[in-house]
Amino acid sequence: MEGKRQRDARFVEAIRQNRAGMFCVARMMLRSDSDAEEAVADATERAYAHLYALRNWQSIRPWLMRITINACHKILRRRKREIPSDDVQVFERQAPPRETENIWALVERLEPLYSLPLTMYYAQGMKLEEIAKVLHAPKGTVSARMARGKQKLRRMIEEERA
């Protein structure tokens, strides 16, 4: 059994490693940097408060993502607002190529049902199994949502080029 200091140190390191991913998911859902920061802060606080419930440190990443998603839902409910479909802002990235910026801007316009798994997979490098765990959906469902999301992206790209 590990001591409180060791557990706290592991938690701080896990947050350090996953904070960018948590922010990316929150930003995708909330479409606002300040709301995303609030969601990540809330998720971090909740995760620490419920750290005793984490049975396996190997699954901390999906666990943190799930808590982040729940924090985002809480913010959306509290403020009773819809995610604007026309609010297209690009992820903050370090000098990405213009095409990549355009693709991520289009991903942000997708419904969260499709944008979340695509973001988790491509931007965060999460495995399909982890995404399924985070979204509480079967692996096949996540795979299908990603395929549909990619189809929608292709159509959007074709429309922009036309």
Image: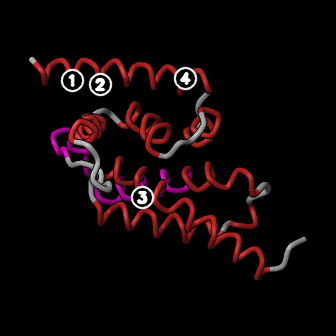
* Residue at the spot 55% in from the left edge and 71% down from the top edge: 45
- Residues 49 and 131: in front is 131
Q: Is 91 displayed left or right of 148 in the figure?
A: left
Instruction: Tell me whether the residue at label 3 lies in contact with that at label 4, contact meaning CB atoms closer than 8 angstroms.
Output: no
Q: Tell me, yes or no, whether the highlighted magenta stretch contains residue 80.
A: yes
Between discs 3 and 4, the one toward the N terminus: 3
Gap between marks 2 and 4, in whole Å?
18 Å
Q: Secondary structure at mark 3?
A: helix
* Residue on which the image places disc 2: 153
Amino acid under label 4?
Thr
In this figure, which residue is indicated by the disc labeled 4?
A: 141
Viewer-side label of 4, 1: 1
Disc 3: CA contacts within 10 A as few (<14), some (14-19) or many (>=20) = many
* Disc 4 secondary structure class: helix
Q: Main secondary structure of the magenta part?
A: helix
Residue type indicated by callout 3: Phe
What's the mark number on residue 157? Answer: 1
Circle 3 sits on which residue? 23
Q: Amino acid at mark 2?
A: Leu
Separation (CA) of disc 1 from disc 2: 6 Å
Q: Which residues are magenta?
A: 66-88
Q: Residues within 10 Å of mark 1 (few under 14, many from 20)?
A: some
Q: Are marks 2 and 4 in contact (CB under 8 Å)?
A: no
Depicted 63 relative to depicted 125: above or below: below
N-terminal-most mark, 2 or 4: 4
Of the 4 image quadrants, the one containing the N terminus is bottom right
Q: Residue 111 placed where, x, y %?
A: 32, 33
